[in-house]
Image (cartoon, rainbow, N blue to C red):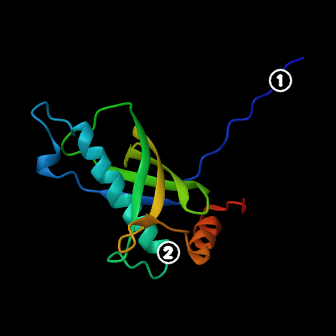
């Protein structure tokens, strides 16, 4: 008996074009690996700001508590790139973020990143619950079920 395996279709509803800056490129003519994390930060900040109403960045931070990244192909100076972002899971205090840097013209994936993010109260210096209206906004945007 042959078993069919159906691949999950991954949908990224948030895509943010980015400009490669002169200082992003090293002496070999490609974007340095450490710079990708700045690209991811820029896109995830835009993602949160566009979905989570009333974020007070002076009071709250969304911090990385785990991150892993795989690099597949070089990005060179002058390339047109974008970052695709999606949330895979929303918990009580954290969410799992899935991001890719892609070639904006060919959609070739250059780098992939998985991270776990936690909402953090800067005044209290501790993690806090994600407001339900933010969790709902993310779930609705991503088409996620409530856990």
| Tag of residue 73 | none
Disc 2: which residue: 52
Helix or strand or loop: what does disc 1 sit on?
Answer: loop
Identify the residue at horizontal 48%, vertical 61% (top origin). 14
Name the foreground residue: 93 vs 95: 93
What count of labels does the image hold? 2
Label 1 with label 2: CB-CB less than 8 Å: no
Rendering coords of residue 78 (x, y %)? 20, 46
Left or right: where does residue 28 sit relative to residue 135?
left
- Classify mark 2: residues with Cα within 10 Å, few (<14), some (14-19) or many (20+): some
Disc 1: which residue: 3
Residue occupying the far right of the picture: 1
Identify the residue at horizontal 36%, vertical 77% (top origin). 59
Rendering coords of residue 120 (x, y %)? 43, 66
Instruction: Name above or below for residue 22 compared with residue 69.
Output: below
The alpha-carbon separation of the residues under discs 1 and 2 comes to 42 Å
Query: Would residue 109 be visible to someone looking at this image?
Result: no
Q: Earlier in the sequence, mark 1 or mark 2?
A: 1
Q: Nearer the viewer, mark 1 or mark 2?
A: 2
Identify the residue at horizontal 13%, vertical 37% (top origin). 26
Residue occupying the far left of the picture: 27
Name the foreground residue: 132 vs 82: 132
Left or right: where does residue 30 sit relative to residue 111?
left
Helix or strand or loop: what does disc 2 sit on?
Answer: loop
Identify the residue at horizontal 29%, vertical 33% (top origin). 74
Rendering coords of residue 54 (x, y %)? 45, 82
Instruction: Name above or below for residue 120 compared with residue 99.
Output: below
Instruction: Name above or below for residue 23 compared with residue 137.
Output: above
């Amino acid at each position: 008996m042959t078993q069919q395996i159906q691949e999950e279709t991954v949908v990224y509803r948030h895509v943010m074009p980015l400009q490669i800056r002169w200082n992003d490129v090293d002496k070999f003519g490609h974007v340095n690996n450490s710079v990708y994390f700045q690209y991811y930060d820029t896109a995830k900040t835009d993602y949160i700001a566009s979905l989570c109403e009333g974020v007070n960045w002076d009071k709250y931070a969304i911090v990385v508590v785990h991150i892993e990244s795989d690099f597949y192909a070089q990005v060179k100076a002058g390339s047109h790139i974008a970052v695709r972002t999606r949330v895979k899971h929303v918990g009580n205090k954290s969410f799992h973020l899935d991001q890719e840097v892609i070639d904006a013209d060919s959609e070739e994936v250059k780098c992939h990143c998985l991270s776990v993010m936690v909402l953090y109260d800067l005044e209290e210096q501790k993690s806090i619950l994600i407001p339900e209206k933010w969790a709902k906004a993310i779930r609705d945007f991503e088409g996620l079920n409530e856990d």
